[in-house]
Image: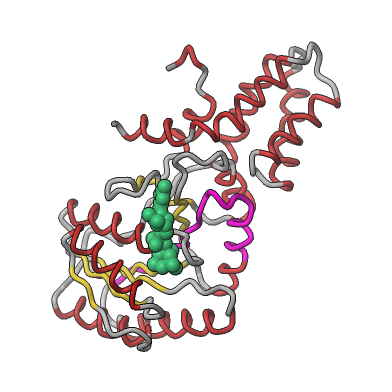
């Protein structure tokens, strides 16, 4: 299946919750009035686009209708498509620094079960197939099973892993991994972390310590940093709240939105982009090794707003 077919397929339920619902509402009105705006706004909130973002979209919509002298409700669908596309803006890809090389250190954070380890497995495989030398640090030392799961993925992806025993200091795993990455000239180091958000203070301290180790260890060498926050799309607006909390802890450079396949809550992409000002860089569309894609907002809008006859 091509990349676009996959995203279109994965976003089918989101499309039902978003644009198909908008279309139904629009079709039930013969003139543009307050009730139409209210119903549209309600539908946006129900589609996990967030209260604040939904209100803003309606505001933009009113403005565009006025500016263009629109009187026919049927024209609203295309205006909504336009507004959401504008809100999503331009995409930002993962940063691997410039062509001169250097080490890219990717720290992967997020709550339990968000999809961190799976994403690392998929990403390692992709980068490896692009010819990059990849090493992974098992810095989620909280459970032995976590290390084991990461090991399975690194075998699948055929990349190196650095691991210590369960319960050891995550920062020391990262320390060793950076040392190996430097001495053996790896291109990318990806660090898995534990996701215990219920103990926010510990988590913050742990992440801060890992960050200090990376900065200190990489001093004087060419390197770039990515801190990717993994969010589970099926949790809808909860994911946005998690992102707010993690933002206080870490300098997040991008979001990976997982489990977009089959959820109706894909509308949170719009709210993430609009309310958090963090780019969505990757999306997870399944559990298999090739089920990770760079986020493409044009494809997203196309998949969501596509009319049957456009297919
Ligand atoms: N359908 C679907 N499932 C996914 C996706 N990404 C991850 N999963 C599943 O989500 C579950 C949790 O994924 P993990 O990668 O273990 O999550 P984690 O963040 O590492 O979790 P902890 O290690 O417990 O903190 C697994 O069953 C994955 O197969 C995705 O894009 N789509
Ligand atoms: Mg994990």
Q: Quadrant of residue 249?
A: bottom right
Residue positioned 30% across, 62% down in the render:
97
Left or right of residue 205, residue 9 in this image? left
Q: Quadrant of the C terminus?
A: top left
In reply to whether residue 231 is colored magenta, the answer given is yes
Q: Is residue 86 visible?
A: yes
Q: Quadrant of residue 191?
A: bottom left
Q: Is residue 6 left or right of residue 158?
A: right
Residue found farthest to the right = 34
Which stretch appears magenta? 223-244
Residue 126 image position (x, y, % from top left): 24, 52
**Nearest to the observer: residue 94 or residue 201:** 201
Relative to 101, is 76 above or below?
Answer: above
In the depicted view, which residue is nearer to us: 122 or 85?
A: 122
Image coordinates of residue 230 in percent, x first then y, are 46, 60
Judge left or right: residue 82 versus residue 123: right
Q: How many numbered discs sit on the rendered protein? A: 0
Q: Is residue 101 left or right of residue 264?
A: left
| Ligand 1 quadrant in view | bottom left
Q: Is 310 situated above or below 296? A: above
| Residue in the picture at 51% in, 85% down | 205
Answer above or below: position of 210 versus 239.
below
């Amino acid at each position: 299946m091509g990349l676009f077919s996959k995203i279109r397929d994965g976003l089918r339920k989101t499309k039902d919750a978003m644009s198909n619902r908008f279309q139904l509402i629009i079709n039930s009105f013969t003139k543009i009035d307050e009730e139409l705006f209210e119903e549209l706004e309600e539908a946006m909130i129900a589609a996990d686009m967030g209260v604040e973002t939904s209100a803003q979209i309606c505001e933009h919509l009113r403005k565009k209708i006025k500016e263009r002298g629109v009187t026919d409700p049927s024209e609203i669908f295309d205006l909504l498509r336009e507004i959401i596309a504008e809100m999503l803006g331009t995409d930002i890809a993962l940063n691997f620094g410039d062509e001169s090389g250097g080490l890219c250190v990717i720290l992967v954070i997020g709550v339990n079960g968000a999809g961190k380890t799976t994403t690392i497995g998929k990403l390692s495989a992709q980068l490896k197939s692009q010819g990059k030398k990849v090493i992974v640090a098992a810095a989620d030392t909280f459970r032995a099973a976590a290390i084991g799961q990461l090991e399975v993925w690194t075998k699948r992806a055929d990349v190196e892993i650095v691991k210590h025993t369960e319960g050891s200091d995550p920062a020391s795993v990262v320390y060793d991994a950076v040392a190996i990455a430097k001495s053996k000239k790896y291109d990318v180091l990806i660090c898995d972390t534990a996701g215990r958000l219920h103990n926010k203070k510990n988590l913050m301290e742990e992440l801060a310590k890992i960050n200090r180790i990376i900065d200190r260890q990489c001093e004087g060498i060419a390197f770039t940093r990515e801190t990717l926050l993994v969010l589970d799309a099926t949790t809808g607006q909860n994911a946005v709240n998690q992102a707010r909390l993690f933002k206080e802890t870490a300098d997040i450079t991008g979001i990976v939105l997982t489990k977009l396949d089959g959820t109706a809550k894909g509308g949170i992409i719009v709210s993430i982009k609009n309310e958090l000002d963090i780019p969505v860089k990757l999306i997870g569309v399944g559990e298999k090794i090739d089920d990770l894609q760079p986020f493409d907002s044009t494809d997203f809008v196309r998949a969501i707003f596509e009319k049957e006859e456009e297919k």
